[in-house]
Image (tube, helix red, strand yellow):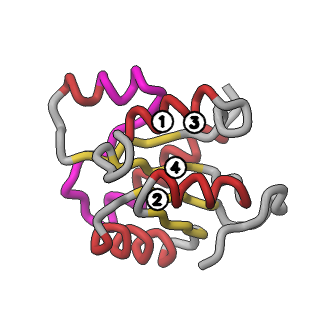
């Protein structure tokens, strides 16, 4: 599915940008979220993700921590330092599930942490819950 353009209507499905360098994991996550009604854009590198972000504003980014061109946490810090992307919630995806890894992800600007391996049902549930929490008025 193609990403929604910047300024898409509010009733459009939520756009999730998945930044994941493993093609199999990217495809599985894409299918799992599309089945649940989300629009999905995928990127295997930070460079590809930047290209998506230049033409669309996702509602949520799922960020693999280990990318081939830059560390996912460093990329998250870059996104949080840029006014154009700072407000996009980022969720860390990682095989490293120790508390220190979660703390590092949160320190980089991630609002959540999903440990690998995940199941499609759990991923969809977690993404929906996180979107609901960030969209709810405080």
What label sits on residue 61 in the rendered view? Answer: 4
What kind of element bears circle 1?
helix
Between discs 4 and 1, the one toward the N terminus: 4
What residue is at 64 percent from the left and 60 percent from the top? Answer: 14
Q: Are marks 4 and 1 in contact (CB under 8 Å)?
A: no
Q: Sort mark 2 into few (<14), some (14-19) or many (20+) by Cα contacts within 10 Å.
A: many
Query: Percent from the top left, x then y, of residue 129?
Result: 48, 48
Q: Are marks 4 and 2 in contact (CB under 8 Å)?
A: yes
Give the SS element for disc 3: helix
* Residue that badge 2 annotates: 18
Q: Real-space Cα distance between discs 3 and 2?
A: 14 Å
Stretch of the chain drawn in magenta: 103-124
Element on which disc 2 rests: strand
At a point 81% along the width and 62% down the height, the residue shown is 8
User: What is the spatial separation of the Cα atoms under label 3 and label 4, in whole angstroms?
Assistant: 10 Å
First in sequence: mark 3 vs mark 4: 4
Horizontally, residue 105 falls left or right of residue 2, namely: left
List x then y, in percent, for residue 21.
33, 61
- Mark sitting on residue 79: 3
Q: Mark 4 and mark 3 in contact (Cβ < 8 Å)?
A: yes
Q: Position of residue 38 (x, y in %)?
A: 57, 68
């Amino acid at each position: 599915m193609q990403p929604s353009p910047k300024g898409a209507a509010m009733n459009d499905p939520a756009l999730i940008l998945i930044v994941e360098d493993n093609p199999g994991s990217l495809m599985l996550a894409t299918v799992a979220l599309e089945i649940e009604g989300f629009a999905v854009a995928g990127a295997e590198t930070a460079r590809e993700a930047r290209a998506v972000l230049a033409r669309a504003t996702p509602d949520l980014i799922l960020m693999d921590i280990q990318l081939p061109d830059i560390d996912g946490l460093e990329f998250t810090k870059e996104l949080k330092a840029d006014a154009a992307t700072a407000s996009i919630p980022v969720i860390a995806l990682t095989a490293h599930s120790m508390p220190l890894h979660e703390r590092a992800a949160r320190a980089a600007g991630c609002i959540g942490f999903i440990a690998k391996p995940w199941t499609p049902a759990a991923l969809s549930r977690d993404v929906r819950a996180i979107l609901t929490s960030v969209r709810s008025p405080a």
